[in-house]
Image: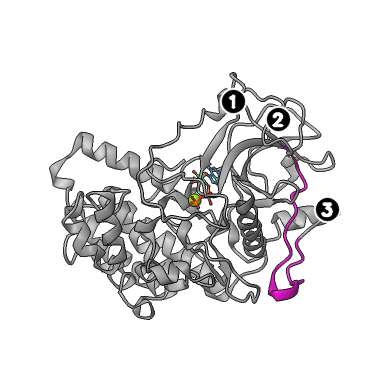
C-alpha cells in the first residue's frame, strides 16, 4: 500500500463521488512473504481453493533489454505468457483478433488461486485503492508445465524437483459492483498491452483475468515508488546533511535515472501501446530491483490501468476522473464541467503532466505534492501549471532550484495548455540529453 495515498472505496454508484486528496493514513505493511502461513481460502469466497503450498522466495522476472528503440517496435517476445499458454492449449489472447469496437480479447487466467493468510488466518494484502483490494496469493500451474521450464516464471523454482510448482501472485479484486466494470476495463487494457512488444520492461506482468470474480492476476512486486520516495525522505530528514539540500531526495543520479526510465516507459505506452494510463502517480509505479548497474537501482513498472483507455478503441469509455488523486491530476481535468462530463477522459498530455508531478515529488520527497491544508492543496491542484512556483515555496522546495536539473526536465511537461506540453517521446529524448550532460559534470564534482 502506498503510505500516504488514499484508500477511499468508491460509493455504490457508478463512480466514486468525490475527488481524493492525499490524507489517509497508511494501511499496515504486509507481512514478509517468508513468514506466511498459507491456509484455505475464505475470502474472496469465489476464488478457488488449493492445498497448502510453500512459496518459493526469490522473485525473478524475465526482462529483455530496454535500450531498444521502442518507436520501431521489436520482435514479439517469444518468452511471453501467451506462448506458454498456447502450448498448453489454454484460452489465450489472439493478438490481432480484435472484437467489436476494436477491443482486444481478454486473457483469461488459467491458474487456480489461493489467497495467502498469516498465522492468525488474516488474508495477506499488498495494498488497496479506490476500486480494489490487492491480495497476496498462491497459484498452482497445470501439472504439465513446471515453472522451471517457464520463461515467464516470476519466481525462482525451489531446488527440489516438483511436477507442479506454486507461484506467488497478486490478485486485484473489486471492492464493489461498480468496480467490476472498472477492473474488466483494466483487464482489456492489460490484455492489449501484454501483446505489445517490450511490455515486460514497462508494465506489471499480467497472468490473466478471472471473469467469475472480476479479478486480475498479476506478478507480485512489493515495493512502490511511493514507498521508496517516502523512505528516502524519512532518511533525509533523519540525517539532513545540509550540503545535499539542493539535490533531489532520491539523489541527483538516481533521480535523473528514474526520469529517464519513466519517460521511456510513458513514450512506449503512448506510442507503441497506444494507451493513455490516466492515473500516473508514485503509488501506481512498482519498483523491481534492476539487473543493470544504473544510478537508480530499480526498474519502474506501471500498474493500475483502472482509468486507462486504448486510443484506437471505439467503444464507450466511462469517466473515472473523480476517482483520481487530485494533486497528480492535470488541471484541465479538474474543472467541475469536465468531472461531470460522462465522456471526459485523460489524454496523453495529462499523463505527461502526472508523470511530471511524480518526478517533482521524487525530488522534494513530499508525497502530498503541495504544502498546507487539504483545501489549499486542492486549490493549488486546479492551478497545477504553477506547480514549480508552488513547490519551491513549500516543503522540500530547495530541492528544485531555479534552472536546476529537475526544473529543466519537468518545465515543458507542466505547461498550462495541454497541447503545448512536451510529447512523451520528445521528453524521453530530452532527459537522455540531460543525462549525457550531467554524468561528466557529476563525475568532475565527485572527483
Ligand atoms: N502487482 C502488485 N504487486 C504488489 N502490490 C500491488 C500490485 N498491484 C497493486 N498493488 C498494491 O495495491 C495497491 C492498489 O492497487 P491499484 O493501484 O492497482 O488499485 P486501484 O483500486 O485501482 O487504486 P487507485 O486508488 O490508485 O485507483 C497499489 O497501490 C499497490 O500498493
Ligand atoms: Mg492505484
Q: Can residue 136 be seen in this view?
A: yes
Residue lying at 58% horizontally and 31% vertically, measured from the top left: 124
Residue lying at 69% horizontally and 29% vertically, measured from the top left: 42
- 287 or 172: nearer the viewer: 172
Which label was assigned to residue 253? none
Percent coordinates x, y for residue 152 in the rendering? 68, 49
Percent coordinates x, y for residue 358 in the rendering? 36, 57
Percent coordinates x, y for residue 347 in the rendering? 47, 72
Percent coordinates x, y for residue 275 in the rendering? 56, 69
Circle 1 or circle 3, nearest the eye: 1
Q: Is residue 430 left or right of residue 110?
A: left
Q: Is residue 161 left or right of residue 230?
A: right
Residue lying at 49% horizontally and 63% vertically, measured from the top left: 278
Q: Name the residue under label 3.
A: 90
Residue lying at 77% horizontally and 27% vertically, measured from the top left: 51
Is label 2 in a helix, a strand or a loop? loop
Q: In this view, does 254 lie to the left or right of 187?
A: left
Amino acid at each position: 500500500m502506498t503510505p500516504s495515498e488514499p484508500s477511499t472505496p468508491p460509493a455504490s454508484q457508478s463512480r466514486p463521488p468525490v475527488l481524493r486528496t492525499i490524507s489517509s493514513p497508511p494501511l499496515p505493511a504486509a507481512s514478509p512473504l517468508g513468514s506466511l502461513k498459507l491456509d484455505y481460502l475464505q475470502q474472496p469466497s469465489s476464488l478457488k481453493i488449493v492445498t497448502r503450498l510453500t512459496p518459493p522466495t526469490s522473485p525473478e522476472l524475465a526482462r529483455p533489454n530496454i535500450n531498444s528503440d521502442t518507436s520501431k517496435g521489436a520482435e514479439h517476445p517469444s518468452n511471453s505468457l501467451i506462448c506458454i499458454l498456447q502450448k498448453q492449449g489454454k484460452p489465450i489472447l489472439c493478438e490481432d483478433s480484435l472484437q467489436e469496437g476494436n477491443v482486444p480479447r481478454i486473457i483469461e487466467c488459467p491458474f487456480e488461486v489461493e489467497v495467502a493468510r498469516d498465522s492468525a488466518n488474516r488474508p495477506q494484502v499488498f495494498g488497496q485503492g479506490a476500486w480494489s483490494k490487492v491480495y497476496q496469493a498462491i497459484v498452482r500451474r497445470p501439472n504439465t508445465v513446471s515453472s522451471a521450464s517457464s520463461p515467464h516464471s516470476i519466481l525462482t523454482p525451489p531446488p527440489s524437483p516438483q511436477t507442479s510448482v506454486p507461484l506467488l501472485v497478486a490478485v486485484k479484486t473489486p471492492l464493489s459492483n461498480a468496480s467490476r466494470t472498472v477492473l474488466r476495463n483494466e483487464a482489456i487494457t492489460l490484455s492489449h498491452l501484454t501483446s505489445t512488444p517490450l511490455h515486460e520492461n514497462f508494465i506489471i506482468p499480467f497472468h490473466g483475468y478471472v471473469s467469475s470474480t472480476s479479478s486480475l492476476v498479476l506478478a507480485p512486486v512489493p515495493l512502490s515508488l511511493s514507498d521508496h520516495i517516502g523512505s528516502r525522505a524519512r532518511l533525509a530528514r533523519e540525517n539532513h546533511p545540509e550540503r545535499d539540500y539542493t539535490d533531489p531526495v532520491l539523489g541527483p543520479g538516481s533521480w535523473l535515472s528514474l526520469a529517464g526510465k519513466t519517460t521511456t516507459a510513458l513514450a512506449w505506452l503512448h506510442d507503441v501501446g497506444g494507451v493513455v494510463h490516466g492515473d500516473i502517480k508514485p503509488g501506481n509505479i512498482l519498483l523491481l530491483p534492476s539487473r543493470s548497474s544504473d544510478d537508480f537501482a530499480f526498474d519502474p513498472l506501471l500498474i493500475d490501468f483502472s482509468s486507462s483507455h486504448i486510443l484506437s478503441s471505439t467503444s464507450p469509455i466511462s469517466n473515472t476522473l473523480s476517482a483520481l488523486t487530485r494533486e497528480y491530476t492535470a488541471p484541465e481535468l479538474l474543472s467541475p464541467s469536465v468531472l461531470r462530463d460522462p465522456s471526459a477522459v485523460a489524454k496523453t498530455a495529462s499523463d505527461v503532466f502526472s508523470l511530471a508531478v511524480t518526478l517533482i515529488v521524487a525530488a522534494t520527497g513530499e508525497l502530498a505534492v503541495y504544502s498546507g491544508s487539504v483545501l489549499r492543496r486542492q486549490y493549488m491542484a486546479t492551478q497545477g501549471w504553477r506547480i514549480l512556483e508552488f513547490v519551491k515555496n513549500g516543503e522540500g522546495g530547495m530541492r528544485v532550484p531555479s534552472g536546476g536539473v529537475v526544473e529543466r526536465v519537468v518545465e515543458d511537461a507542466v505547461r498550462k495548455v495541454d497541447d503545448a506540453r512536451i510529447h512523451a517521446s520528445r521528453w524521453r529524448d530530452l532527459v537522455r540529453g540531460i543525462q549525457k550532460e550531467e554524468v561528466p559534470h557529476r563525475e568532475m564534482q565527485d572527483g
